[in-house]
Image: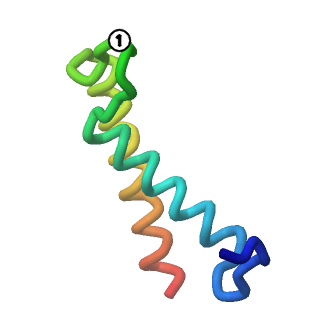
């Protein structure tokens, strides 16, 4: 296994992949063992709505930029 940087992916691509994984974890309510359950609380519901709105805004700008 080589630790040399991959020339096919930029740091921005890696950032997008990590952000998508984090968003998926936030939407589905995945949590590490031993932590408090917050998936069905009002604050998590509000966070999911805001995350969805942000995704729609980004999709809108990406569509208009093409």
Q: Position of residue 31 (x, y in %)?
A: 35, 29
Residue at the extreme left of the image, as rendered: 40
Residue at the extreme right of the image, as rendered: 4
Q: Position of residue 44 (x, y in %)?
A: 32, 24
The one of 38 and 43 positioned closer to us in this rendering = 38
Q: Position of residue 20 (x, y in %)?
A: 44, 57
- The colour scheme of the drawn protein is rainbow
Name which residue lies at 61% across and 66% down: 14
Residue 9 vertical position relative to residue 36 in the rendered view, above or below: below
Residue 35 vertical position relative to residue 26 in the rendered view, above or below: above
Q: Position of residue 59 (x, y in %)?
A: 41, 67
Residue at the extreme front of the image, as rendered: 1
- In which quadrant of the rendered view does residue 46 lie? top left
Task: Tell me the SS state at disc 1.
Answer: loop
- In which quadrant of the rendered view does residue 29 lie? top left
Q: Is residue 40 left or right of residue 61?
A: left
Name which residue lies at 41% across and 68% down: 60
Residue at the extreme top of the image, as rendered: 36
Disc 1 residue crowd, few under 14, some 14–19, many 20+, Cα 10 Å: few
Name which residue lies at 52% across and 53% down: 19
Quadrant containing the N terminus in the rendered view:
bottom right
Q: Is residue 2 left or right of residue 42?
A: right
Give the labeled residue for mark 1: 36
């Amino acid at each position: 296994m080589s630790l040399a940087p991959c020339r096919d992916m930029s740091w921005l691509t890696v950032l997008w992949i990590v952000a998508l994984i984090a968003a998926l974890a936030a939407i589905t309510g995945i949590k590490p063992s031993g932590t408090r359950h917050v998936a069905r609380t009002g604050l998590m519901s509000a966070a999911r709505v805001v995350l969805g709105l942000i995704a729609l805004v980004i999709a809108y700008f990406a569509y208009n930029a093409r």
